């Protein structure tokens, strides 16, 4: 799915309305009906009466339409409609107010034209934020900041329409979060907004879902995009069911250079995940100290002994492997840094793409000149701290993503920037956000699992960009499956590795 800027979404909406013959008021009514359904579901779950804050613009129009539907469905919300001086509301919003009064009366509607006394709110309330949505691109005024803070501090459950009020649709660094609505659920009007995806906005946006605005394919196709959302249907096309007459030779041979004394768990996790992700064969190249560990923990895998006893000293291709992953648990000993540099020079000369994760990235941070030897179309999988060790400290995820785009385009590589909504940054500068995942993945070793999955998909013949996008989707889904059994606190990386096959199966079937 393409992710558009707010200006593009406005253009798409205008073109869709022209193409279908609908007007903006009818669209607001349709979105209000969908929003009412989502709000009613949450209200039934928590047993709360909705309290709707409606602003003067398009977002307020949808909020009033939703309130009318909620009232018709038996859930009469209290409504606070902000029409300062009696003149700030747009015509469509005034029409929505009039329609509400005509159908539902005025008992539950308070129109604010001047001063406003904040109602008492508590954790037992459900607030619908229909104040501003995407309509503002700068911080809220002081009076609305006070309103937003009071709503946030009440502990009420909050559903935001379009955008949490105070957060611009395309995002903006440096905003003060306490002056922005902290939603538990955000209902996107038509299409998701770019500001949903940076990690800093997670506590503001909460969960999100899209309300159908009826935008036409032609209107959306007329606009290019640099950002995309990975979708299940795309992964299903990639991970097709296997042929009945296939053998392990059809699914590639991955080598994982991993492990050191005391860190063989990382090698084990990456190797097991690669097996669960369908690689025909997996070889773990590790120090000699890992022989018994690997042969016992992952008997399905082959073991290739390094010359070193406790850390890697000879990263080299002893066979014609289908894919290569380097890094989980290898440490940063001088000999390991030296052999990684030597390997990258050879791989670069042979245009042999590799996956670099964990300690391979830490080795590069120690010797940044290795960046010049990373083969084109290789994959780097840093989390924020690993990225900053190599490329310098960044003030936030927006700045880090911008740097990742610059690096990916310059070096012609793929960067998997791990975190909330992991971003797969491609060599052409395009970014694919991953929608799957759970806080349960915030545990040691899950990055090693992701490396194994990427390696398995590349060994099976998927291109670098496709393998990376499919892997982050499957990895996030495996985390969700593991969470159902063990809960957010109880998931381990081994659980995620074991759930990888089930995640793939659920996509295919």
Image (cartoon, rainbow, N blue to C red):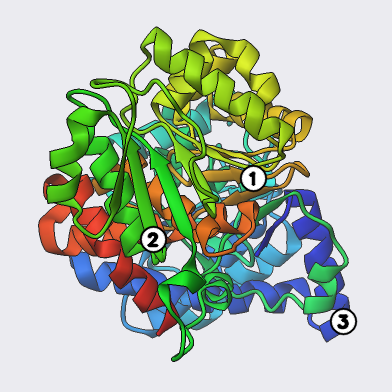
Give the residue at x 34% y 30%: 306
Q: Within 10 angstroms of label 1, few (less than 14), some, or many (20 or more) residues? A: many
Q: Which residue is mark 2?
A: 281
What separation in Å lies between label 2 and label 3 (alpha carbons)? 53 Å
Image quarter (top left, top right, bottom left or bottom right) of the C terminus: bottom left
Q: Nearer the viewer, residue 297 or 410?
A: 297
Q: Is residue 486 above or below residue 197?
A: below
What residue is rendered at 70% in x and 20% in y? 372
Sequence-wise first label, 2 or 3 = 3
In front of the other: 406 or 224:
406
Q: Which residue is mark 1?
A: 169
Q: Which residue is mark 3?
A: 19
Residue 140 position within the rendered picture, expressed as x and y whole percent measured from the top left: 58, 31
User: How far from the left and from the top, in percent, is residue 65?
Assistant: 55, 72
Label 3 vs label 1: CA separation? Answer: 25 Å
The mark that comes first in sequence, 1 or 2, is 1
């Amino acid at each position: 799915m393409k992710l558009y800027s707010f200006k593009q979404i406005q253009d798409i909406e205008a073109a869709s309305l022209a193409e279908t013959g609908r007007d903006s008021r009818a669209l607001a009514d349709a979105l209000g009906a969908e929003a009412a359904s989502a709000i009613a579901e949450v209200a039934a779950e928590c047993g709360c009466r909705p309290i709707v804050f409606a602003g003067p613009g398009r977002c307020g129009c949808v909020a009033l339409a939703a309130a009318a539907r909620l009232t018709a469905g038996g859930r009469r919300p209290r409504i606070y409609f902000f029409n300062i001086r009696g003149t700030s509301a747009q015509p469509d919003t005034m029409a929505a107010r009039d329609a509400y009064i005509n159908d539902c009366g005025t008992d539950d509607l308070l129109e604010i034209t001047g001063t406003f006394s904040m109602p008492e709110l508590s954790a037992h309330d459900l607030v619908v934020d229909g104040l501003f949505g995407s309509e503002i691109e700068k911080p809220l005024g002081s009076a609305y900041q006070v309103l937003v803070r009071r709503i946030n501090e009440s502990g009420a459950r909050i559903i935001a329409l379009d955008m949490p009020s105070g957060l611009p649709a395309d995002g903006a660094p440096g905003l003060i979060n306490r002056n922005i609505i902290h939603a538990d659920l955000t209902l996107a009007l038509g299409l998701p907004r770019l500001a949903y995806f940076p990690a800093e906005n997670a506590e503001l946006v909460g969960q999100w879902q899209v309300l159908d605005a009826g935008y036409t394919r032609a209107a959306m196709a007329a606009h290019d995009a640099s950002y995309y959302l990975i979708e299940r249907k795309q992964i299903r096309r990639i991970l097709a069911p296997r042929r009945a007459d296939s053998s392990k030779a059809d699914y590639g041979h991955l080598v994982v250079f991993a492990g050191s004394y005391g860190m063989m768990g990382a090698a084990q996790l990456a190797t097991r995940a690669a097996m669960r992700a369908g690689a025909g064969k997996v070889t773990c190249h590790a120090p000699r100290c890992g022989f018994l560990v690997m042969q016992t923990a992952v008997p399905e895998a082959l073991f290739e002994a390094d010359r070193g006893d406790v850390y890697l000293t000879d990263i080299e291709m002893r066979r014609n492997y289908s894919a290569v992953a380097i890094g989980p648990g290898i440490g940063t000993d001088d000999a390991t840094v030296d052999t990684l540099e030597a390997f990258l020079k050879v791989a670069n000369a042979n245009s042999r793409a590799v996956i670099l994760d964990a300690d391979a990235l830490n080795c590069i941070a120690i010797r940044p000149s290795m960046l010049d030897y990373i083969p084109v179309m290789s994959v780097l999988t840093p989390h924020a701290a690993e990225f900053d060790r190599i490329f310098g400290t960044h003030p936030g995820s927006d700045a880090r993503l911008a740097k990742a785009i610059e690096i990916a385009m310059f070096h012609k590589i793929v960067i998997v920037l791990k975190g909330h909504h992991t971003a797969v940054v491609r060599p052409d500068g395009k970014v694919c956000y991953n929608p799957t995942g759970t806080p349960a993945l915030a545990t040691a070793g899950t990055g090693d699992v992701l490396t194994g999955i990427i390696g398995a998909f590349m060994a099976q013949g998927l291109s670098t960009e496709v393998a990376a996008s499919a892997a982050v989707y499957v990895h996030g889904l495996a985390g969700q499956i593991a969470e159902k059994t063990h809960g957010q606190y109880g998931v381990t990386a081994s659980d995620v590795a074991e759930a990888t096959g089930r995640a793939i199966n659920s996509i295919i079937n």
